[in-house]
Amino acid sequence: MPHPDHIAEADAPPYGPSATAAEPQLAVPVRRRFTRAEYAQMADLGLFDGQRVELFEGDILAMTPAGPGHSSANSRLLQVFFRLLLENQHLRVQEPLAPRDSESAPEPDLAVVAGAPGDYRDRHPEAALLVVEVSKATLAFDRVEKAQLYARMGIPEYLILNLIDNQLEYHAQPLPDSATPGGWRYGTYRVLRVGETVRLEGLGGVEIPIGELIDT
């Protein structure tokens, strides 16, 4: 048997530069994004029955089921905001918005929308005057991705009711920013706690004690 050093080049496996076999063509997985129309059609067919899902930038996200704390906070917000509505405004609770330039259908926990409910029999609103997210498990997502989307939609005020730290996080003044992945951000950000108040321009400049929004 010849010594390994004497193996003929033709006997060498075709792994190195001398290989003549064609390199295999590797398939790269392509991410499949959905349009808002496709998402609506799937919902109409009942594909999401019994699930909490949301379309975000073409991706269908499985959302965390609402726990008792989330539901209680949302009910409290509904009571407070309902009595503060101005003429020609109404509330939408966990209902889709349809931003013009995004394949998204965010469903904020609460949205103050211009007009009457009947104005949207055939379409979802493209934006809102103010939106609120009650946040715990999705806090990081709501602070970054959701904030950038809402800013791009031109929503003047965005509130996060942070159930982890028992505080309200107030965002206002949407502006373009090429340094962010979403291309937009809010220019004003404030953290407010019990004992302080928040002024909401979308509701005529009313000031709401934070203690009315947070169950301590």
Image (cartoon, grey):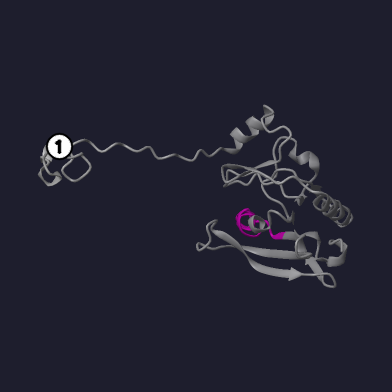
Q: Does the stretch in magenta take in 144?
A: yes
Q: Amino acid at mark 1?
A: Asp
Residue found 80% across the figure and 44% down from its top? 116
Q: Nearer the viewer, residue 126 or 4?
A: 4
Residue found 79% across the figure and 67% down from its top? 199
Which class describes the residues within 10 Å of circle 1: few (<14), some (14-19), or many (20+)? few
Q: Nearer the viewer, residue 186 or 49?
A: 49
Pick out the residue farthest to the front.
1
Q: Nearer the viewer, residue 123 or 19?
A: 19
Which image quadrant is residue 120 in?
Answer: top right
Q: Which residues are magenta?
A: 143-158
Q: Does the stretch in magenta take in 74?
A: no
Give the residue at mark 1.
Answer: 11
For the question of whether residue 151 can be seen, the reply is yes
Residue 57 screen position, x and y as percent: 57, 46
Pick out the residue farthest to the top.
45
Q: In which quadrant will I find the C terminus?
A: bottom right
Name the side, left or right, on which 23 lies relative to 12.
right
